[in-house]
Image: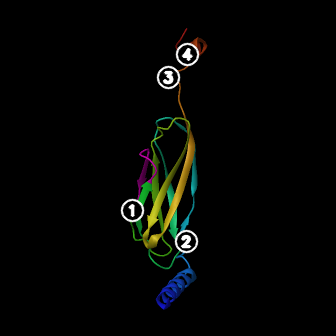
Amino acid sequence: MKKLLMMFSLILLVVAVKAQTAPAAQPDVSKVIEIKDLDHDFGKIPFGKPAEYELILKNISKDSVKIENVQVGCGCTTPKWSAGPYAAGQEFKVGIGFNGATDGEFHKVVTIFFNGGLSQVIKFHGQTYKTPDNPAPANSTLEKMKPGSK
């Protein structure tokens, strides 16, 4: 009985100690990196025509920062980046390319991973439109107005 009581007390003590430790807080990337455009609007772009933009970031910490990886949500997105390191106060860019092969409205994400366990999700969206297969029909009136025509 004493052994059972001792074992139960020990388990209760371990559970009580575990309950007192708070879970580790996630690092706040906004205290280290300033990002100008977290949700970029491409607007309307022609279907199948690649579009790009440069995401501007700034190291607002006192330590240097490195990009460890840039992960895209699908094969239609291509990132261009350099690992760094980027000194305190330094601005740097991450290029985001989109191939425009999504028909109609699109919403995409890119995740940037930094040293120190920091990461940031970047979103971009827009809409593609298809150009007509056939050009507009010829306008005979305009043809008559051209110099040298009769």
Magenta includes 112?
no
Q: Mark 2: which amino acid?
A: Asp
Q: Nearer the viewer, residue 32 or 135?
A: 32
User: What's the CA distance linking mark 4 and mark 3?
Assistant: 12 Å
**What kind of element bears circle 2?**
loop
Whole-percent x, y for residue 111 in the image? 48, 58
The answer to whether residue 105 of the structure is visible from this angle is: yes
Kind of residue at disc 1: Ser
Horizontal side of residue 93 vs 124, given as left or right = left
- Alpha carbon distance from label 1 to label 3: 40 Å
Provide the secondary structure element on which disc 1 rests: loop
Magenta-highlighted residues = 72-82
Q: Which residue carries the number 2 mark?
A: 28
Of marks 4 and 2, the one in the foreground: 2
Numbered disc in front, either 3 or 2: 2
Residue 61 % position (x, y): 52, 76
Circle 1 residue: 82
The local crowd at label 1, few if under 14, some if 14 to 19, many if 20 or more residues have their Cα within 10 Å, is: some
Q: Which residue is mark 3?
A: 133
Find residue 92 and report its horizontal and vertical position in percent: 47, 64
Distance between the Cα atoms at labels 4 and 2?
Answer: 58 Å
Measuring 56% from the left and 84% from the top, which residue is drawn there? 16
Are discs 4 and 3 less than 8 Å apart at CB? no
Residue 137, numbered label: 4
Q: CA distance from mark 4 to mark 1?
A: 49 Å
* Residue 47 on image: x %, y %: 50, 35
Mark 3: amino acid = Asp
Q: Tell me which amino acid carries mark 4.
A: Pro
Question: Which residue reaches farthest right?
Answer: 141
